[in-house]
Image (cartoon, rainbow, N blue to C red):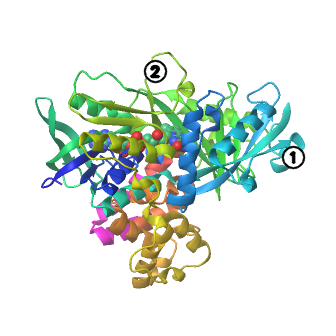
Amino acid sequence: MSREEFDLCVIGGGINGAAVARDAALRGLSVALVEAGDFAGATSSRSSKLIHGGFRYLPQWHFLLVYHALRERERLRHRTAPHLVRPIRFLFPVYKGRGFGRLTMDVGLWLYDIFARTPWSERHRILSSKAALQREPALATDNLTGAALYYDAWADDARLTLENVLDAGMHRAAVANYVLVEGLAKNSDRIEAVRVRDVVNDERLEIHAHHYVNAAGPWVDDIRRMDDPGARPSVRLTKGVHLVFPRRALPVHEPIVLSDEADRIVFVMPHDRYVLVGTTDTDFSGDRRAVAADRNDIKYLLKVLGDGLPKITLTEDDIASSFAGLRALVVSGDGKSPSAVPREETILESASGMVSVAGGKLTTHREIAEKVVDRLLKKLGRSAGRSPTRTEPLPGAREIEGDDDSNTAFAGDTARFLEARYGTRARLVARIVAERPELAAPLAPDCPAIGAEVIHAIRNEMAHCVADFLVRRTSLIWRYPLEAEAAAPAVARIMASELGWDSEREDAEVSGFVSDLKRRRAA
Ligand code: FAD
């Protein structure tokens, strides 16, 4: 990275930075991407995981936002990332005198279906209260007038980010995690280089490029101030918390949309043995690297669950895991409540030419990246044309080189889990198993991940530590938290032998991961 002069250097390996690097690389620019921690280590692994139009924006008249998001949802689901983006059907109960009425819901969802060109088999339906209760007997019954059933989509946010990074790399971008931008080298108004520190090897170097994109998410203004110390804040940070419960404690039958007293919506999403519940939306000004659920967040979500599903009793002790992320919302200056601020992205250009991009939605990452790269190509005097990312599948949705039938080594649940995580790239895991059959075993009893995935994550997906694997490569921290805890020693053992760690490092990795998980439980 320090030897080459790039067309573009991207700061931040969340979904926005990863998608900009991928788009630029696919359009032939030479690109460097640096991320301070692990790819998707901040907001982009802490979202609600929905790839959605955002039904709630329709009553706020944000039709264009919803239309664009639905168009991107369909593209990801059917064309570019079908292995990662899957349909999810929500039950949205309707109550007299609260939130959307049945008619408003019906009209809104007609629009939603039209925007997304939803096939008949997936079009929304309006149910009577009796039919709603047949589907979900735990719903609150007072003033229940019915419910809507509608389709959206969800994805593993961290893996979606990672696949953008991997594809950028496959198109000759230089990509690195654990490389922190500490400053900018400037010559009068021009940025000559970014000064970075490789935090793994504690080495400092400079990366030279003709153009710079700042996609540092909640830190976007820190980077802007490195460029212009007088830069005014461009984003407002709000915290969003999710809680994870074992399904036996929260035995819902299907994904549900609940509302609080002010009609803010909270998603309840069962995933196999656990249920994800979120989110909150409150202004935040604390330590951005240590953002976590607090007592008030937990109280709020338990109340929404208690009011919406009164037959189920939950306490703090039932929490199996939690996570919190920070939205970077457009500064509106009009005193709007966090939930009323539209989720559009912010794109700003400084006097030095650095382009900063923040916010938006996971769902619209590709479109945001296309806009940023169009702007850069114009500055470079090249014609933009249509971005290939509109049609080019992500790596796990493409055939892989030297393909063979080694995936048939897996059967049943293992084949299903691997396909859902890696798509066609599950074959790379199968090749590792072919070399080392002992790594076909689960990492712990009932754990939906096998030993060979740890090797795959190190060799092919740039994982450096236990948390990279259990939090972001597999999402086990929230999808299977108890199984993740049981798997941590086996993950550390395999990493130790592959990366040459001593026993002290191996123990520290396990205890670091387990204490993080305990903090997430105790919140
Ligand atoms: P980030 O993911 O935060 O990435 C910025 C990166 O920059 C970080 O990884 C950080 O480490 C790095 N960085 C910072 N400083 C430096 C530095 N000095 N050097 C190098 N790197 C640096 N969207 C949806 O579409 N659907 C949803 O369901 C959804 N739910 C959400 C729920 C919550 C609670 C939140 C908070 C957001 C949600 N979103 C959702 C929005 C979506 O998650 C964000 O828009 C998106 O993740 C933002 O990505 P980003 O790349 O801008 O930021």
Above or below: residue 33 compared with residue 311: below
Task: Inspect the magenta stretch and tell me whether residue 510 lies in it.
Answer: yes
Q: Residues within 10 Å of mark 1 (few under 14, many from 20)?
A: few
Label 2 – label 1 distance at C-alpha: 42 Å
- Mark whose residue sits in front, 2 or 1: 2
| Mark 2 in CB contact with mark 1 (< 8 angstroms) | no
Residue 313 lies, with reference to residue 119, above or below; the image says: above
Instruction: Assign a secondary structure to mark 2.
Output: loop
Point out residue 409 in the picture as x, y percentages from the top left corner.
52, 82
User: In terms of secondary structure, what is the magenta stretch mainly?
Assistant: helix
Residue located 68% across and 30% down the image: 260
Q: In terms of image quarters, where does ligand 1 lie?
A: top left
Q: Which mark is residue 332?
A: 2
Task: Identify the residue at horizontal 65%, vertical 41% (top origin).
Answer: 267
Q: Position of residue 393 (x, y in %)?
A: 46, 61
* Amino acid type, label 2: Ser
Which residue position holds label 1?
Answer: 131
Can residue 51 be spotted in the picture? no
| Magenta span of residues | 492-514
Q: Is residue 24 above or below residue 96?
A: below
Residue reaching furthest to the top: 334
Q: Residues within 10 Å of mark 2 (few under 14, many from 20)?
A: few
Lower position in the chain sequence, tag 2 or tag 1: 1
